[in-house]
Amino acid sequence: MDILDRYIGKTMLMGVLAVMLVMIALDSLISFAGETSSIGRVNYGVWDAIIYIVLNIPQKIYIMFPMITLLGTILSLGVLAGNSELIAIRAAGVSIMRITYSVLKTGVILTAFVVAVGEFVAPPVVQYAKLKRVNAMEAKISLNTDYGLWARDGSNYIHIRHIENDGQLTGINIYVYDEQHNLVQTLSAAYAEYGDGHWILYEVVKRSIFDDRIEEEFAATVNWQSLLNPEVVDVVSISPDNLSIIKLRSYIDYLQSNKLNSEEYELTFWSKLIAPITIAAMIVLAIPFVFGSLRNVGAGQRILVGFLIGLGFFIFNKLIGNAGLVYTNYPWIAAIIPTLVVLVIGIFLLRRIK
């Protein structure tokens, strides 16, 4: 059976790789078309757009991998079926469940690969791509928006004008409120650096607000203890989809400690956590396409149906996710439901195969 596992695994890997290359190529062409409107802005040229798209490929692979796995499994098993190899394997007494087991073993390797890409490769690469794109367009070395970054720190509010490439903050304004939500103090700093577990504010103007007066004083440096650590600052400007599970957990804790809404990040956290199960569910769903009612149709038809089902899963996943954010306080339920539905359908269809 080791020979069978290796043969099916090799065929499946080739099928998944072929589908991945095609889907990434198509997505890159579409992305480049979208970038053409930005080409020519300051120093952002064609080569910059190409680099930006290439650097985003690891994240695209991670996002599209459930569909890639579905189509790759259909394609690879379809090739075996077209060459009558599956018939020979079945005639040798190998059950469909045993073939499914062989496919799932390969799926474990693929899952480990894509999880590693999604956790350790994609997040820093996407962040670098985003920063490089901003640098080329804005001719600046800092990551910022037109209005800077706003964040809550306990009962206080913070405005940061720029986040520099080395993690230094510039243009910081801190608004301190008392328990009655009255503004009692503001601090304005030229820049801030993190060290020894706290921020150090430089060139600080401190204004204390009283009922009858405002007192102002200057300090060269001020130690600033804040929940807004460098890891959180690193996260704030990035989409939840571009964060690793560890950073998502860290930012969720930060939001919850400040009594801020964390449900969007929780949904992404749980979706990433169950990604291996989602990939396995797609593999299970793909098996009936080859052995079931579609076994006698051409490869093109199987791929088309598989693509439509994969697209349907993507849309269903988004709809359930958005509905979960609106109608429930448990984002993990919204994250699990689509995968659970696919897995149940796949097992049901698999058990019906004779």
Image (cartoon, rainbow, N blue to C red):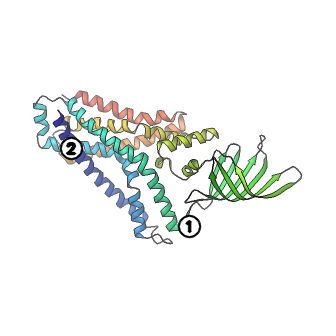
Asked if 27 appears above or below 273 in the picture, the reply is: below
- Label 2 sits on a secondary structure element that is helix
Q: Label 1: few (<14), some or many (≥20) within 10 Å? A: some
**Percent coordinates x, y for residue 179 in the rendering:** 77, 40
Amino acid beneath label 2: Lys
Which numbered circle lies on residue 106?
A: none
Image side of residue 91 versus residue 202, left or right? left
Which numbered circle lies on residue 140?
A: 1
Q: Label 2: few (<14), some or many (≥20) within 10 Å? A: some
At horizontal 38% and vertical 52% (from top left) the residue drawn is: 58
- Label 1 sits on a secondary structure element that is loop
**Percent coordinates x, y for residue 196 in the rendering:** 63, 48
At horizontal 60% and vertical 58% (from top left) the residue drawn is: 168
Task: State which quarter of the image contains the C terminus.
Answer: top left
At horizontal 66% and vertical 51% (from top left) the residue drawn is: 199
Query: Is residue 29 or residue 176 the one in the foreground?
Result: 176
Task: State which quarter of the image contains the N terminus.
Answer: top left
Query: Is residue 219 or residue 315 the one in the foreground?
Result: 219
Query: Is residue 333 or residue 298 the one in the foreground?
Result: 333
Mark closer to the chain start, 1 or 2: 2
Please, which residue is most extreme toward the right here?
Answer: 212
Is residue 340 in sight in this rendering?
yes
Image side of residue 89 versus residue 349, left or right? left
Q: Quadrant of residue 125?
A: bottom left
Q: Marks 1 and 2: CB-CB under 8 Å? A: no
Give the Cα separation between the discs numbered 1 and 2: 48 Å
At horizontal 48% and vertical 59% (from top left) the residue drawn is: 130
Amino acid beneath label 1: Lys
Image side of residue 255 versus residue 16, left or right? right
Please, which residue is most extreme toward the front here?
Answer: 196
Image side of residue 47 versus residue 209, left or right? left
Q: Which residue is mark 2?
A: 10
